[in-house]
Image: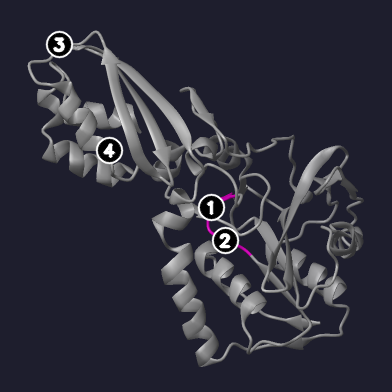
Amino acid sequence: MIYVPCDSLDPLYNFSLEEYLATSDRIDFPAMFMFWRTNPTIMIGRFQNTVEEINQEYIDKNNMQVVRRNSGGGAIYTDPGVWQFSFIVKDYERENIDFKSFVDPVIKALKKVGVRAELTGRNDILVKNKKICGNAQFMKSKSMVHHGSILFDADIDAMTYGLKVSKEKISSKGVKSIRSRVANISDFIDIKLTPDEFKSVMLDELLDGDFYIYSLTDYDKESIKQLYDSKFNTWEWNYGKSPKYSISRASRFKGGKVEFNLNIENGIIKECKIYGDFFSVRDVENLEDGLVGIKYKKDELELRLDELNAGYYIHGVSSNEILNCLI
């Protein structure tokens, strides 16, 4: 087994590294392994609608990151109290998704710290009917990547609020997350372990003393940076890859009730209709048309609303209030 150390807490970099290892022609090891962590982050499944899965207001206030991963499945929360692991197998020959062969070594390693876990359902590791690890897989350039997220000492409150679904009505063709009860592994361990001590125990078992450490070359680092800049650190990947969806936002102001109905595709507003019992001395259709074609993104909405002097279209309602209603 080739072990690729990853000390970065930046999920964008870590996913860039993972994809590079899977796709690079210069990296021809048959099997590689990563064990890594992130800053507070919401990871979105490949086929999910980002807007539907996250509480953007909470994320902004708490300086959390949002990143779409290459694999399917549901949205998850990670932070430095959560350990991620990645198995990368080159020239993978099986045609079907196979979680068990990758998860069994993890379950065996958990027993070393006194945690009796089991694979339940399609991809979850449970302890006493509580989820402590989710798993996902994807194929890339004939490589199988299996990665999982082990809740060691996660901030469960941040997880709850960061993944909170908006109360506003959203209809979408995206795949919705399946939320279940979760717990930290630290809740089930009799002895106190720091996250780093837990990492050491897991690596000792998973690598079984038979591994080679691969150090990234300058070429590797530059290639990873290109992936970082062109894919994982872009709004188009993390938000714009969302499926078609419609969203309705409404608020009541001193000037009356205002309701926005938006059709969004690849993160771009394709259609906007405004309803309500407000008064206006301008043609509201001009405001509707003015919002079409821009990204459903706070800073771009704010700029466009200012350009349009949106507050003049809806009497008694400011551009900033419209912005807060839209997001």
The amino acid marked with disc number 2 is Thr
The picture quadrant where one finds residue 163 is top right
Image height of 140 relative to 128, above or below: below
The amino acid marked with disc number 4 is Val
Is there any visible trace of residue 107 in the rendered image? yes
Pick whichever, 44 or 114, lies toward us: 44
Residue stretch rendered in magenta on the structure: 37-44
Left or right: where does residue 262 sit relative to residue 309?
right
The percent coordinates of residue 140 (x first, y second) are 67, 69
Q: Which residue is mark 3?
A: 279
Tag 3 near tag 2, CB within 8 Å: no
SS state under label 1: strand
Image height of 219 relative to 284, above or below: below
Q: Earlier in the sequence, mark 3 or mark 4?
A: 3
Q: Which residue is mark 4?
A: 292
Tag 1 near tag 2, CB within 8 Å: yes
How far apart are labels 1 and 2 at the CA level? 7 Å
In the image, farthest residue toward the top: 277
